[in-house]
């Protein structure tokens, strides 16, 4: 028997005592007693006696008696060796390009990426004599022991669900039970990718530049992100798909989040108006053989200046309708205030009258908020129209004046009326006086609203008149394009009946016929609009054109051409297309607005030679030129990035040079008309900078020298704008210039700051502006990831919906995308229009 025995702390333990008989008498039983505890008896079997001793927690002496013999053993209760720490050294799959990862295991579970090799190491509370691990039937591994630590050889952990670790210490104590570790593998999941704050539908003019921020995230690392655009070919003769892709690789395999700004310009991509382009963001991680993932589709609708003008007209028409409702509400409110004012003295001094005055004040505040919102939306429509070169500065200025006057009205007479009504509610003694003041202010507001409404009505009519002419002219151009498409097909289709055409040519012919059907529907819609416009305005030219279109049976004639194309009677169809293109153009010329109808009424009313007026006109023109120069700079950068891969580089550079020439010409006209000597040096310097850009683009040079020259030109445009604003303030102070002119200029400066992405609302993508104004910063700004349809599937086809008012049928996605641009100006929902009437 050992003198000392180490036993598990608090656990029943066995003590085996050898029994050797030295006499004939052999004892059959033995006892063991720990301290003063009750003795434990057992039988002697053979030559041994085994005792099961209750668990002990204190060191003590065990007295063993067999017959008249006895022995003592010191019992030392000791805790079993316990696991202090378990670590996993993970060797991730080689394709991830990660260093080994040390991970502390907690809660008895461990998750790893498929394909990893794992080395487990553990630390026990005492020095070990041995350790092992079991990971399935007949799958045991002896572990390497070093003092109180053990380690396993690297395991390919795939397919293992559980590991059981066992160990014994140098005291002879083992773990009470195997320590189990639940093991679970997980797949390396694909990355997630999407555009940052880019709406599903975007409207762009050809010269716009879209900044598309792409954000990708992966559980281990993003290898590459990309940007893809694709569209159907212009004519449907080949059904060819145009597609271009840009990609950016990660420099660090452990970059789990990558964001990059890609730019898209229809002009640089040589995408004409009336085209739809699908944008996708893509990303790939480091998993071998995995296809890249795609974001949901964003649709860019490239529209012509004429279509853009029509959409703006519809927006202004919507604002006008709401303005009319506010005017009716203000009229009703003024009548209610007058009725309250006319109450007998005793009733006017009572609580009912006070309550009524409070209600009137609340309604006035509501109407003021509504007119302020309409002002913001009108200003945003003007800002949007500034991107469209077909709008004259004088027209834009008239619209801006309307927006400004609505804003002044909301903070002037309408606010004054509200304050007087509030005072009338609180002060019974002065109630008659305050109500009289309120009624006077309300009447002023009604008169101002009616005046603004009259001008906006005229502006919307003039805009529709102009868009009708432009859309007829655009339709004539479309007919000529179909004529050209047929000319390309004729060499292969002439002399063949429609059912004899090969499938490719048959498909192309049917597509041209389909386009002609669209043109026929557009012409019928235009004819109806012209007729209704004449009925409303009684402008004689529109009545004449409407009658001529009816007499010519326009719809039937254009549909007959569709039939000729479908039956492959190409030569006759081409003759008819040419003739109808000419006729449509002649009607457009007849409808071309002149004088006041062209939006020149404001010019006649303000051409008094007043220096302040001249500077206001210059300001509007320079704001537009700065935007154009900034957009041109973005297009130049984009073209330079694609220079090596773009076979059309030279042609695209020529288009940039042509745009720069137009800016130079317009700037020269402004310089000649300038009457403010203080502006002349900056005008000269700006002209030289613009000329330098033109010369560089003519080489062609689209790299750093041109970019620096364009930056200088944009800065000089800003200097001119600021100088005009400063000069206007000086004139107001020193020469007593009309206050209205200074306010108008200040309003335009504020309006110019309200920028957003093309076809989007203000604030949807910070730091990015329509047309490419670079006032907001770079493209590397991080943002949250909006996860879209990761499959990249497109939604169903979209139908053409009829526009509001007198507008033609505009594709709903065009209209909705632009409407979101205006509606996002103010985050608050539009309030219902108050009529001022009691329920």
Image (spheres, rainbow, N blue to C red):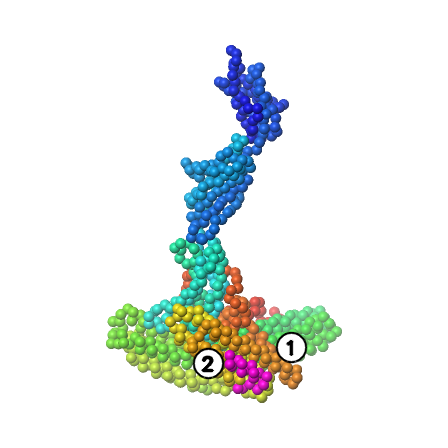
Magenta-drawn segment: 672-689
User: Circle 2: is it few (<14), some (14-19), or many (20+) Cα within 10 Å?
Assistant: some
The quadrant in which residue 590 appears is: bottom left
Q: Name the quadrant of the C terminus.
A: bottom right
Q: Nearer the viewer, residue 203 or 563?
A: 203
For marks 2 and 1, the one nearer the N-term is 1
Residue 402 seen anywhere in this rendered image of the structure: no
Residue drawn at (29%, 71%) of the image: 505
Instruction: Kindly identify which residue carries mark 1.
Output: 413
Q: Does 372 sit left or right of 567 as displayed?
A: right
- Which of these two is toward me, 510 or 549? 510
Q: Is residue 2 magenta?
A: no
**As drawn, is 197 to the left or to the right of 520?**
right
10 Å crowding of disc 1: few (<14), some (14-19), many (20+): many
Identify the residue under disc 2.
Answer: 661
Foreground disc of the pair 2, 1: 2
Percent of width and height locating residue 616: 57, 82
């Amino acid at each position: 028997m050992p003198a000392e025995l180490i036993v598990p702390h608090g656990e029943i333990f066995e003590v085996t005592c050898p029994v050797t008989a030295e006499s004939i008498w052999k004892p059959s039983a033995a006892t063991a007693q720990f301290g003063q505890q009750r003795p434990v008896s057992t039988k002697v079997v053979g030559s041994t006696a085994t005792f099961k001793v209750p668990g002990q927690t204190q060191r003590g002496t065990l007295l063993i008696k067999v017959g008249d013999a006895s022995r003592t053993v010191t019992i030392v209760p000791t805790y079993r060796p316990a696991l202090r720490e378990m670590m996993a050294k993970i060797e991730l799959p080689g394709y991830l390009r990660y260093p080994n990862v040390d991970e502390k295991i907690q809660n008895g579970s461990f998750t790893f990426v498929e394909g990893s090799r794992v080395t487990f190491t553990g630390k026990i509370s005492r020095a070990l004599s041995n350790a092992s691990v079991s990971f399935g039937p007949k799958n045991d591994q002896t572990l390497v022991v070093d003092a109180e630590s053990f380690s396993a050889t690297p395991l390919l952990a795939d397919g293992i669900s559980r590991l059981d670790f066992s160990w014994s210490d140098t005291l002879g104590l083992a773990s009470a039970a195997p320590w189990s570790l639940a093991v679970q593998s997980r797949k390396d999941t694909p990355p997630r990718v999407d555009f940052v704050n880019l709406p599903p539908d975007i409207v762009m003019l050809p010269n716009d530049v879209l900044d598309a921020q792409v954000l990708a995230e992966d559980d281990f690392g993003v290898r590459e992100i990309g940007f893809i655009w694709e569209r159907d070919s212009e004519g449907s003769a080949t059904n060819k798909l145009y597609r271009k892709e840009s990609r950016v690789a990660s420099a660090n395999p452990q970059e789990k989040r990558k964001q990059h700004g890609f730019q898209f310009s229809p002009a640089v991509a040589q995408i004409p108006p009336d085209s739809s382009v699908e944008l996708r963001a893509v990303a790939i991680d480091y998993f071998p053989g995995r296809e890249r993932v795609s974001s949901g589709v964003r649709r860019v609708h490239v529209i012509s200046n004429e279509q853009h003008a029509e959409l703006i007209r519809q927006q202004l028409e919507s604002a006008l309708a709401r303005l009319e409702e506010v005017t009716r509400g203000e009229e009703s409110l003024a009548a209610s205030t007058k009725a309250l004012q006319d109450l007998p003295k005793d009733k006017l001094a009572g609580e009912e009258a006070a309550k009524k005055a409070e209600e009137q004040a609340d309604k006035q505040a509501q109407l003021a908020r509504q007119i302020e919102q309409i002002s913001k939306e009108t200003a945003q429509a003007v800002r949007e129209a500034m991107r469209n070169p077909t709008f004259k500065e004088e027209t834009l200025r008239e619209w801006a004046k309307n927006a400004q006057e609505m804003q002044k009205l909301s903070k002037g007479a309408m606010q004054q009326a509200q304050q007087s009504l509030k005072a009338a509610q609180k002060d019974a003694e002065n109630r008659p006086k305050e109500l009289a003041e309120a009624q006077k202010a309300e009447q002023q507001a009604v008169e101002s609203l009616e005046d603004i409404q009259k001008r906006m009505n005229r502006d919307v009519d003039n805009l529709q008149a102009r868009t009708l002419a432009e859309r007829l002219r655009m339709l004539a151009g479309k007919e000529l394009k179909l004529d050209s498409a047929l000319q390309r097909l004729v060499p292969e289709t002439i002399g063949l009946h429609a059912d004899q055409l090969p499938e490719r040519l048959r498909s192309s012919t049917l597509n041209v016929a389909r386009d002609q059907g669209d043109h026929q529907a557009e012409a019928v819609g235009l004819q109806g609009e012209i007729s209704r416009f004449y009925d409303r305005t009684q402008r004689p030219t529109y009545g004449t054109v409407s009658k001529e279109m009816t007499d010519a049976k326009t719809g039937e004639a254009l549909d007959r051409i569709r039939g000729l194309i479908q039956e492959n009677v190409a030569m006759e169809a081409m003759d008819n297309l040419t003739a109808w293109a000419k006729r449509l153009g002649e009607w457009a010329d007849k409808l071309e607005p002149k004088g006041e109808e062209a939006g020149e009424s404001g010019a006649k009313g303000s051409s008094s030679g007043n220096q302040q007026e001249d500077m206001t006109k210059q300001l509007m023109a320079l704001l537009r030129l700065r935007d154009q120069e900034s957009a041109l700079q973005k297009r130049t950068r984009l073209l330079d990035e694609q220079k090596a891969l773009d076979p059309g580089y030279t042609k695209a550079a020529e288009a940039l040079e042509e745009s720069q020439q137009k800016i130079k010409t317009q700037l020269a006209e402004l310089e000649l008309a300038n009457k403010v000597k203080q502006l002349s040096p900056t005008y000269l310097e700006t002209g030289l900078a613009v000329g330098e850009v033109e010369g560089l683009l003519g080489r062609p040079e689209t790299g750093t020298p041109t970019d620096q020259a364009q930056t200088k030109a944009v800065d000089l445009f800003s200097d001119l704008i600021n100088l005009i604003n400063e000069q206007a303030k000086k004139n107001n102070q020193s020469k007593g210039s009309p206050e209205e002119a200074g306010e108008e200029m200040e309003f335009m400066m504020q309006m110019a700051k309200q920028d957003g992405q093309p076809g989007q609302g203000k604030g949807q993508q910070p730091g990015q502006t329509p047309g490419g104004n670079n006032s907001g910063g770079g493209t590397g700004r991080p943002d949250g990831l909006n996860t879209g349809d990761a499959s990249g599937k497109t939604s169903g086809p979209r139908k053409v919906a009829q526009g509001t008012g007198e507008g033609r049928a505009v594709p709903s996605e065009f209209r909705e995308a632009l409407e979101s641009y205006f509606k996002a100006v103010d985050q608050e929902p539009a309030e219902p229009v108050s009529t001022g009437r009691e329920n």
